[in-house]
Image (cartoon, grey):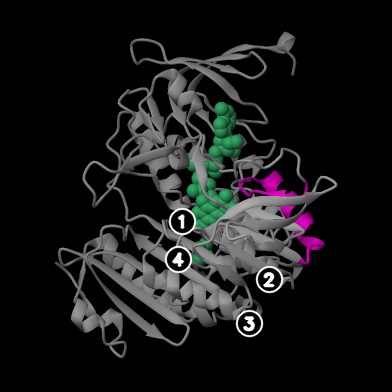
Amino acid sequence: MPKVIYTSPDGRAHTVDARIGASVMETAVKHGIPGIVAECGGALSCATCHVFVATSWIDQTGTAEDFEDEMLDDATTPRQSHSRLSCQIRLTDEFDGLEVTIAPEQ
Amino acid sequence: MTQDQATEQHTGILVVGGGEAGVAVATQLRTLGYAEAVTIVGGEPYAPYQRPPLSKGFLNGTEDEESLELRASEFFEEQRIVVWTGRRVEQLDLGTNCTGGVATLDDGSRVSYDGLALATGASARTLPGIPPGLRGVHTLRGMADAIALRAALDGSAEVVVIGGGFIGLEVAATARSRGARVTVVETMSRLLQRLCAPPLSEHCLKVHRDAGIDVLLDCSVASLRASHGAVTGVELDDGTVLRASLVVVGIGAVPDIELAQAAGLRCQRGVVVDAAGRTGRVDVVAAGDCTVQRHPHRVDALLGIESVHNAVEQGKAAAHVLLGLEPPAPATPWFWSDQGDLKIQMAGISDGYDDHVVRKVDDRLTVLYYRHGNLIAVEVANNPREFMILRRALDKGHHIDRDRAEDVATPLRELVQSP
Ligand SMILES: Cc1cc2nc3c(=O)[nH]c(=O)nc-3n(C[C@H](O)[C@H](O)[C@H](O)COP(=O)(O)OP(=O)(O)OC[C@H]3O[C@@H](n4cnc5c(N)ncnc54)[C@H](O)[C@@H]3O)c2cc1C
Ligand code: FES
């Protein structure tokens, strides 16, 4: 099971065991990690699952494309180069130890 | 459980229905620091799950049952939220002085409570006159329906979808992408008639026809044809018969209000509440698809808002109300629908508009709706960037000049004005 480390807007870190195939958003929401709202449940329609991927992981996760990229341009917290909508990152074993910081406003 | 195992228990707050709204009430109670017992009674034999993927990712096989769960079971345990699945509340005695009552479950168990939240949702409307048990005829509301429909789609070459609403069109797009021959039959003169304004309806019609779906408007079903207990065709009111191995009936949902009605709560199609789920009794709230609330633009009209956003926001607000706290101001309602490559997002209630602006570039469409000069709603297809800007403008009460919005070359972001 890959572990994902989330840093909440209040600075606290939460480590969660993720299911393979689940998204970074889904893993957080199911365990009640504060900060990820995910109004649309992963349908790429709300942009309330915005995270900053740790720079050391960005090659692995890849960067936003197409609609995700457009939505991040107008996300509530201004985007950074390593911004992603966390419902669009699906977890595999290769993501064990992935670190993301949750955007302060969704 | 049998009647012999019926129990007597007490809970602080009883939530009837374990969907989006019920889970929102329960989790918000904990967020607000409520310490007494919270119990959710959910009629379906599944842990609380999301419905939207049932007609989208779950139906096309990219999502499974586990990925649809709203929360992990450990989360409910940590939060001390007790979830009973596969058990129904059959009867409510609301008591006389608004300080709690008693619910009776289907196994005869009785649960007394201090506060009650009704989140019973809705059921799929069925087509009258269909012989019960006819194979090949499906509706889609819950997980069990979706599992059955997914299996049925596998071998079906000819699919007829009755009803051109969101769920019907989502199912039609999925069936088409799997290679089936698909016909949508709609009684009204346009798609999504009750749900959006004409510009978006026309856009949807073109997209689905271009994808090879036959869409028949102004067209009603007279009867179903069957052979050996299975459906074989759909006869239309003009006598035409469409061959069908699978018929999906997507003609809307009916709020589940039997309990509320029998208990004496005010109901008019749904349980009548305000945006915060108030029923008129301090110890009873209702939220989500089982409710209707005041229409924002039509005097004396009531509106049922069947969306995840409303279920969650009303559920959260209702938790405040149960604890005697002031609920947050209601946010602009919004909705999404994914129909194959067509991505629809809408915010606000367009019904009641007196002016609108269409921005269309290739397959991207944005429609802004105004009433008395104010922006009241937006509907967007394949244009998530503009949706982000417009939804925020609606939420914050910002203005967008309608004449300048007509020029598609001007980015909307430049037009947003604070009041
Ligand atoms: C196929 C489909 C696709 C959808 N797609 C979208 C979408 O893309 N975007 C969007 O915003 N919305 C969508 N919706 C609508 C959205 O899912 C609903 O608005 C939302 O689920 C409403 O939540 P709810 O909690 O009010 O009701 P529900 O989710 O219906 O939950 C109510 C629950 O209460 C239970 N119940 C009823 N009576 C009793 C009783 N007496 N005792 C115990 N339990 C009881 C029911 O069994 C049910 O499990 C879709 C709905 C469907 C069916
Ligand atoms: S959860 Fe809505 S866009 Fe990610």
- Residue named by callout 3: A59
- Residue named by callout 2: B176
Front one among A42 and A77: A42
- Residue named by callout 4: B190
| Image position of B79 (left or right of B315) | right
The residue lying at 59 percent from left, 54 percent from top is B221
Of tags 1 and 4, which is closer to the observer? 4
Image location (x, y in percent) of residue B197: 36, 65
Badge 1: chain ID: A
Image location (x, y in percent) of residue B56: 63, 62
| Image position of B201 (left or right of B40) | left
- Residue named by callout 1: A35
Mark 2 residue's CB less than 8 Å from ligand 1: no
Three-letter amino acid code at the position of disc 1: Gly
Alpha-carbon distance for marks 3 and 2?
36 Å
Looking at the rendered structure, the secondary structure element under dot 3 is: helix
- Whether the residues at callouts 2 and 4 have beta carbons within 8 Å, the answer is no
